[in-house]
Amino acid sequence: MDMATDLVVRGGTVVDGSGTRRADVLVRGGRIVAVEEGIAVGGALGADVVDAGGAYVVPGGIDVHTHFALPVGAVTSADDFESGTLAAACGGTTCVIDFAGAGREPWQEALATWHDRARGRALVDYGLHLTVTEMPLDPDGAAQRFAAFVEHGVTSVKLYLAYPDRLMVDDDTLGRALAASRRTGVRVCVHAEDGATVETLVAEAVAAGRTGPDAVPSVRPPSVEAEAVRRAAGLAGAAGAWLYVVHLSSRAGLQAVLAARASGVDIHTETCPHYLHLEQSHLEAGAPDFVCAPPLRQASDRAALWRALDAGDVEVVSTDHCPFTTQDRRRGTGGTGWTDFRQIPGGLSGVETRLSLVYQGVLDRRLSLERWVDATSGSPARLFGLDGVKGAVRPGLDADLVVFDPGATRRLDAANLHSRCDHSPYAGLEVTGWPAVTISRGDVVAVGGEPADPRPGRGRFVRRTPLRP
Ligand SMILES: [Zn+2]
């Protein structure tokens, strides 16, 4: 690992949790050492200069929800750690937190597998969450297991309330995880869809011959999201533990989050760019490429999520990046072609387009500049144990920086993006605002949305800190 050259990012408008101000940023040894106006190049002799005139200088994006190289039955998500982190860098994201674990394998095995997949391939830094499908019955044993996660630098887990065939946990298991969370400071995240109700609705739809992608919104309606949020929040409240709801998609789900918060539950949530920008009409038109869970929703849900994002009620935008190629969508999870929507591998592309897609909310006056930065970097750092390391433009932090050109335009077709997936859910959409330069620990890793001197393997595993019990 060579030492990054000194760098000055000059003439930009710095935006982060401390506000918006004109400042230059001096980088030395991969860290930010000064943020102030008029840093003379003479004061940083020999430093490279990045011109940020007319641009925003923001902390590198942190995407806390990706699925790189995730096997789902016979197929695997299209991006591995190499293409996924390269796409991330081109779109202004300098840290991802990927979910380790593909099913019910032991956690040690999941962690070892994911470290193997990332090591030597990642272009930007990465952390890992663990997927939890069972918990020791004994409370001390449960807490010891979470304490072991912390020792491995993993301070968050996800439990699924859906997918009974491979991932779903019952309420007792979630309760034990929340109790262990309270003792160890490991953040519990939930995939909030009520699996039993979904199964019933799926069986009814298939029996009625409704087998295409157009059936998906009705078998995973907003009510199953709201119900799962209520159930998980009730358990979190009883345990006095924190709860984080991943990929919130609906107005009903949002109302359940807000009600739980009002009753005193320490609950946080994220949404994804596809729930802010896309609607279920794509599924109603029968397009298998738009299948994901929870499904795309209606205009009223989008509007509610934008408002909640601006208000800070939804703190984070992550991507749930998990695309599948056209060929793999056709093959289906069984590998021989899908006959009904259950076998369509679900998940959308997002890791490269997140910063710009959320920035569109700033242009549309739905969101402040500060909320844009906080939702894509500040809050993820604070909520996931990276505070003081990443997520702000401040001396002492990693020099993960994005020079964001508010005038750059880009058409979000797959050909203009770096995912290995051959289609983009945003094809045809032209956005305004794109990263001009992406800097990871002082190294320029992308310029003008294209990789610069890509060195897979320079990205490092970031050990995260637990919440304070
Ligand atoms: Zn996910």
Image (spheres, rainbow, N blue to C red):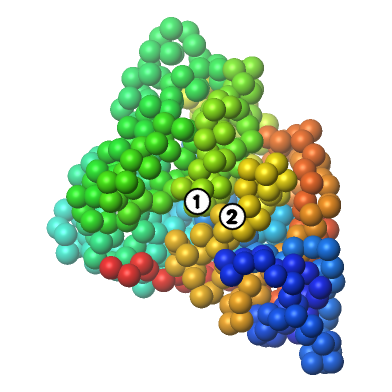
Q: What whole-number distance in Å separates the C-alpha atoms at marks 1 and 2?
A: 7 Å
Q: Which residue is mark 1?
A: 312
Q: Residue furthest left?
A: 138
Question: Which class describes the residues within 10 Å of circle 1: few (<14), some (14-19), or many (20+)?
Answer: some
Q: Position of residue 409 (x, y in %)?
A: 83, 47
In the picture, measured across the screen, residue 91 lies left or right of residue 110, that is right
Label 2 beta carbon less than 8 Å to ligand 1: no
- Rendered view: 388 above or below 75: below
Using the rendered image of the protein, determine whether residue 267 is visible from the camera's viewpoint: yes
Q: Which mark is residue 371?
A: 2
Q: Is residue 135 above or below residue 94?
A: above
Residue 41, quarter of picture: bottom right
Q: Is 295 left or right of 323, judged from the image as shown?
A: left
Q: Position of residue 341 (x, y in %)?
A: 51, 22
Residue at horizontal 66 percent and vertical 56 percent from the top:
369
Q: Residue at x 49, y 69 (%)?
A: 386
User: Which sits in the foreground, 36 or 183?
Assistant: 36
Q: Decide: marks 1, 2 in contact (CB < 8 A)?
A: yes
Q: Position of residue 281 (x, y in %)?
A: 62, 21
Quadrant (top left/top right/bottom left/bottom right) for the N terminus: bottom right
**Residue type of the residue flagged with mark 1:** Gly
Mark positioned earlier in the residue sequence (1 or 2): 1
Q: Residue at x 83, y 58 (%)?
A: 448
